Amino acid sequence: MATTFKVIVNGQHQLAVDPSQGTLLEAIEAAGIESHFHCRNGFCGACRTVLLEGQVSYINEPLAFIRPGDCLPCCCVPASDLNIEHR
């Protein structure tokens, strides 16, 4: 049975995200939340998101710089319930 995590986006959207179904960015887009991105591979950092609570796991190690407290949803999946500020 797949694990599903609760992801709160911008304090107003609550998603149920199954990490086996794709990246965090794909889940955000599937929920109809506008997202800014370019590469979808962790190279550019355009999708940089503030990770307020929780942990993510990277599918492939991003090359873009990630500040403490940020994540790149284009190449990660939830590893716990999350609270994020996504632009």
Image (spheres, helix red, strand yellow):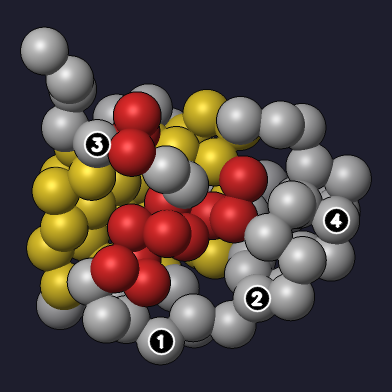
Q: Quadrant of residue 79?
A: top left
* Residue 85 relative to residue 80: left or right: right
In the rendered structure, which amino acid carries the disc numbered 2? Answer: Phe
Label 1 – label 4 distance at C-alpha:
20 Å
Q: Residue at x 52, y 28 (%)?
A: 57
Does residue 81 show up? no
Q: Residue at x 23, y 52 (%)?
A: 7
Label 2 – label 1 distance at C-alpha:
10 Å
Q: Are marks 4 and 2 in contact (CB under 8 Å)?
A: no
Whole-percent x and y of residue 17? 23, 45
- Marked residue nearer the N-terminal end (4 or 2): 2
Instruction: Give the residue number, with chain letter if any, for mark 4.
Output: 43
Q: Secondary structure at mark 2?
A: loop
Whole-percent x and y of residue 28? 34, 66
Q: Is residue 29 above or below residue 36?
A: above
Instruction: Give the residue number, with chain letter if any, for mark 2.
Output: 37
* Residue 86 relative to residue 62: left or right: left
Q: Residue at x 33, y 38 (%)?
A: 21
Q: Are marks 4 and 3 in contact (CB under 8 Å)?
A: no
Q: Secondary structure at mark 3?
A: loop
For label 1, the crowd category at 10 Å Cα-Cα, with few meaning under 14, some 14 to 19 and many 20 or more, is: few
- Marked residue nearer the N-terminal end (1 or 3): 3
In the rendered structure, which amino acid carries the disc numbered 1? Answer: Glu
Closer to us: 72 or 53: 72
Label 1 – label 3 distance at C-alpha:
20 Å
In the rendered structure, which amino acid carries the disc numbered 3? Answer: Asp
For label 2, the crowd category at 10 Å Cα-Cα, with few meaning under 14, some 14 to 19 and many 20 or more, is: some
- Marked residue nearer the N-terminal end (4 or 3): 3
Residue 34 - label: 1
